Amino acid sequence: MTFETVARRHRARPHWRLWALANLTYSLGVIGFDLSAHPIAVAPAFFLYMLLAAGPLATAAGLDAFEGRRIPIGWGAAFALLPGIAYGVTPADRFGTTTLPQFAAGAGLAVSLGTAGLYLMLTPATRLAIARRMLGLTMLANLPSYISALALPLQPTGLFYIVAHYAWMSQPVLTLIANLTLLAIPILRANEELRRAALTDPLTGLHNRAWLAASDQAYAGRGGVLAALDLDGFKQVNDVNGHAAGDELLVRIAESLQRWCARHGADAVRLGGDEFLIVMPGASEHLAADLRRHVHQDRLAILGVPQWSTSIGFAAYPADSPSLAEAMQVADKALYQDKAGKRTPAYARAA
């Protein structure tokens, strides 16, 4: 009932509806089999097996919807129909204490469940990898109970019967774990977004000083090059065209720096105002020169505002540096030398 209640309150969010559907279909399937007289006719059995198989598949589809992925409706529908089809097309011969159609349908359920579990375990996830793996693991952990049920007609007594009984008893626990994981996913996402917001500049989307402080030692230990960059004439842009134009200029410069960083494995940081820092792990003087050319070319492409230019200074830092602080100071000095003389940007080396 929890998922149904939340789904009614958040109708615009399809993942809640899919998770509510997953719980509803599985529950109806279990109740339907408990209330049905055996042997079950093909039509109702097909429907009940489809309900059981649809539960884990709808769970996986809900997680895809939550992450904004395209839901694989085609193969999901095929695996939901598989157990019922297996039940309908299998000859009604005996197999131990059960029938071959029941055995085939049970095998189809195991395949559907295993497919949904493997899909969650193996599909790349950007933000919710842990949650996807947890859900996939709980589905795969249900397989022993399905397999033991399939094999039970071969040995319906003794130790195997006890093992199969305890395997089936694990299903409610695994279902509870899966449901708690689903309920926790929005909380995990909210925490991740808060953490990302704390490390991101809200105007440009670049990293901020908090990110730089958190990443300082990791980058310092790898060695590389820093580039300190700021804008000349930025105050004039704000004074003549307004702060909205200044903000737009900063955003466009940030986008340009981000594209360059994506190509070269670097990171761009907005330190504040019109000041930026480019962290280039393992970079060389050649890469620094390429950044200087890129910044100059980009300035020529953004000349729809009053005259402005870019000052930039570089500093190399050795591997196993304790922090980036010294290299930042050296890069700042090189930047101000460039600002003062508008010469080719100085390239310095931290001790």
Image: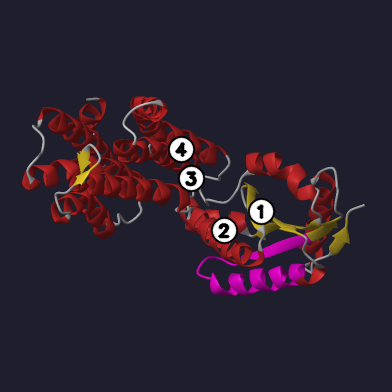
Asked if residue 64 shows in the view, the reply is no
Residue hosting label 4:
134
- Amino acid type shown at disc 1: Phe
Viewer-closest of 86 and 340:
86
Q: Are marks 4 and 3 in contact (CB under 8 Å)?
A: no
Q: Are marks 3 and 1 in contact (CB under 8 Å)?
A: no
Residue hosting label 2:
254
Residue at 63% in and 62% down: 261
Question: Neighbour class for label 2 at 10 Å: few (<14), some, many (≥20)?
Answer: many
Q: Nearer the viewer, mark 3 or mark 1?
A: 3
Comes first in the chain, label 2 or label 4: 4
Report whether 15 appears left or right of 277.
Answer: left
Residue at 13% in and 47% down: 46
Q: Are marks 2 and 1 in contact (CB under 8 Å)?
A: yes
Question: Neighbour class for label 1 at 10 Å: few (<14), some, many (≥20)?
Answer: many
Viewer-closest of 151 and 316:
151
User: Which numbered dot is residue 127?
Assistant: 3
In the depicted structure, whether residue 177 falls above or below residue 262: above
Comes first in the chain, label 3 or label 1: 3
Comes first in the chain, label 4 or label 1: 4
Q: Report the Cα–Cα distance between label 4 and label 3.
A: 13 Å
Residue hosting label 1:
276
